[in-house]
Amino acid sequence: MNATVEELLARLEQLEARVDEHSLFPGASADVLFLLVASLNVFFMQCGFGMLEAGSVTSRSTQAILLKNLLDACLSAFIWWVMGHGIAFDGTNDFIGTAGSDMSSFFLSGYGSGPDSGYHRVFWWFQWTFAAAAGTIVSGAVAERAQLLAYLAYTFILTAVIYPIIVHWCWSEAGWLSTKNGHVDSGGNFTSDAVLDGVIDFAGSGVVHLTGGTAGFFGALIIGPRHGRFEVVYDGSKPPRRGRPLQLPGHAPVLQALGTFILWLGWYGFNAGSQLRIATPGASEVIGRIVVNTTLSAAGSGLVSLAIATLGQWRRGTVNYEVPAICNGILAG
């Protein structure tokens, strides 16, 4: 009887191992595939930024703006590999990521070849696409008036220092604003160690877009407006006074529309991909809500933006349905 029980227990252990094998690895593979597709969408946003910005500037500035976008992607990739990802997610310091853990992200030196290494590497790529997007946001804000070397210096500082530190604050397990920063007490309850229990930034509205937008705002403020953006008033003052703003239409509405559609597509990877895993219970429901909300917010904002722009023209006695108006609305939504 004892031998029979032992045999049954051994067979039960074998069955449990087979269940684990057939449940864990397909789920892990699904997570990798999900994050891979999401990363592809977000990376394709670099093309969207390039088309949108190329269509929004004068024809003579097209090559310069595209070169900056390409260099953004190339330079930020190496920065994120060398140090950006490590500063963002490594260590136990609540302000900045530090080296020293077995799973070091600096140079991806601690990723090894274990069963989870594939997911971790795809996660690195997913986070790099976010970092590249944060950097590219500024290229449009300073278009046609930033020298190449100055722009590359900004890209280095933002991708290597500023953006990774903000990511560490909000998304790492040790950040002082992260909802993941905490401990489980003796009763099994999670207690947050973050300031005011941390901030929830699911898909980077603050970490990515506010960071890039703030950098773009101050860049534009320091550099100043594009030549011809404002009317020059010669009234004896030195230098001449700045008058009313003038329209500076882009040379290619086709590229503006194409870039907008590509960016709209990329935001499904941006927002839905931030779920990070699809094989966990309830993940598919969350992802479904995300894609619906992303669709309706972009579509609704585009319609409202076009309506407001058209109404303003109608009050001035002219009506001209403008492509940039609906494009800006879609992107804002």
Image (cartoon, rainbow, N blue to C red):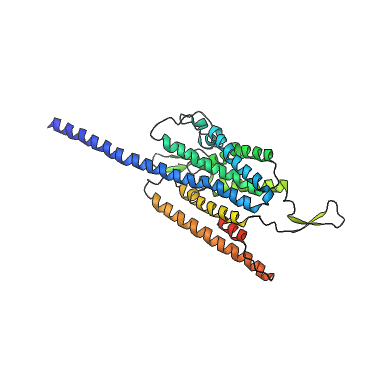
Residue 11 rendering spot, x and y as whole percentages: 20, 35
> In the current view of this chain or complex, which residue is farthest to the right?
236
| The N terminus, quarter of image | top left
Q: Is residue 212 above or below residue 295?
A: above
Query: 115 left or right of 268?
Result: left
| The C terminus, quarter of image | bottom right
Evaluate whether residue 321 shows in this view: yes
Residue 69 rendering spot, x and y as whole percentages: 60, 44
Q: Which residue lies at the image location 49% right of the left edge and 32% below the top edge?
A: 108
Residue 117 rendering spot, x and y as whole percentages: 42, 34
Q: Nearer the viewer, residue 305 or 167?
A: 305
Choose top left, top right, bottom left or bottom right for residue 154.
top right
Choose top left, top right, bottom left or bottom right for residue 211.
top right
Q: Which residue lies at the image location 14% right of the left edge and 33% below the top edge?
A: 4
> In the current view of this chain or complex, which residue is farthest to the left?
1
Q: Is residue 48 above or below residue 319?
A: above
